[in-house]
Image (spheres, rainbow, N blue to C red):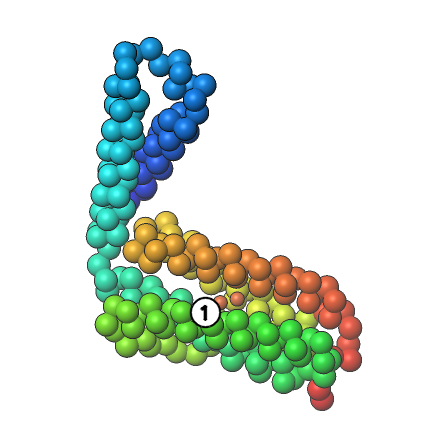
């Protein structure tokens, strides 16, 4: 187990204990049973809880501090590539199909990726660094066959999720204030959406513009 994993595990255990104490303190049926004279036992419990909370805050800072800013920025630049490819490939594929509904939904997905792109770019800029990226690493599909390009998008969304998960395992999410977990939620929604599109449009043939 790496030091980061150990710290994370410790933090989780402490957070659970702190939450248990909190529950006990809020439950009159439990606090009534504490037979230490006066209010002292409850004060002690509250103090332990407070100390645990402080330890959790320190561990959070330690996890974030162990990672150099350059690593966080490199990671974000890589994540930016998945979004950059997604914006343009959704738009490209939207132009290549005739079906109005599929066209609209592909454009909607592209606009959402634009928002992801902006969020990640702003994160990079917040570290005082210029964002950089290159095209087609995650989305190398020029096919205009819906079944084929939708599957490519599915693969690219999964690549973005995998990258975010790697970042979380490395402790980068703490340095980014939970941003990666939020991004995973969005991308998982996109995967669900794409699977529905594949089911609805994948088998039909007259979707191509040419
Ligand atoms: Fe995205
Ligand atoms: Fe996405």
Residue under the point 27% across and 11% down: 37
> Disc 1 on helix, strand or loop?
helix
Front residue of 121/88: it is 121
Q: Is residue 40 something that shows in the picture?
A: yes
Is 50 positioned to the left or the right of 159 in the image? left
Relative horizontal placement of residue 98, taking residue 128 as reference (left or right): right
> Is the residue at mark 1 in contact range of ligand 1, meaning its CB lies under 8 Å from it?
yes
Question: Which residue is at a point 28% across and 19% down the rendered structure image?
Answer: 39
Q: How many marks?
A: 1
**Quarter-of-image position of residue 176:** bottom left
Identify the residue under disc 1.
116
Residue 163 rendering spot, x and y as whole percentages: 42, 59
Identity of the residue drawn at 63% across and 63% down? 193
What residue is shown at x 26% (from left), y 52% (from top)? 64
Tell me if mark 1 has few (under 14), some (14-19) or many (20+) residues whose alpha carbon lies within 10 angstroms of its own: many
Q: Is residue 158 visible?
A: no
Quarter that holds the C terminus: bottom right
- 36 or 101: nearer the eye? 36
User: Could you tell me which quadrant the N terminus lies in?
Assistant: top left
Specify the farthest residue to the front.
38
Q: Residue 130: percent from the left, percent from the top?
A: 28, 77
Above or below, 27 against 150 in this view is above
């Amino acid at each position: 187990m790496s030091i980061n994993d150990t710290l994370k595990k410790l933090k989780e255990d402490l957070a659970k204990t702190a939450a248990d104490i909190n529950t006990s303190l809020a439950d009159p049926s439990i606090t009534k049973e504490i037979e230490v004279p006066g209010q002292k036992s409850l004060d002690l419990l509250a103090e332990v809880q407070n100390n645990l909370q402080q330890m959790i805050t320190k561990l959070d800072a330690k996890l974030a501090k162990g990672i150099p800013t350059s690593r966080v920025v490199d990671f974000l630049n890589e994540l930016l590539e998945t979004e950059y490819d997604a914006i343009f490939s959704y738009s490209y594929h939207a132009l290549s199909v005739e079906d109005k509904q599929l066209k609209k939904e592909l454009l909607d997905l592209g606009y959402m990726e634009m928002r992801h792109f902006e969020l990640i770019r702003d994160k990079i800029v917040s570290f005082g660094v210029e964002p950089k990226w290159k095209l087609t690493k995650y989305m190398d599909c020029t096919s205009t066959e819906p079944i084929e390009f939708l599957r490519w998008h599915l693969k690219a969304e999964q690549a973005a999720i995998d990258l975010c998960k790697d970042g979380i395992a490395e402790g980068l999410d703490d340095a980014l204030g939970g941003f990666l977990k939020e991004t995973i939620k969005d991308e998982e929604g996109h995967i669900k959406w794409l699977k529905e599109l594949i089911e609805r449009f994948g088998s039909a043939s007259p979707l191509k513009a040419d």
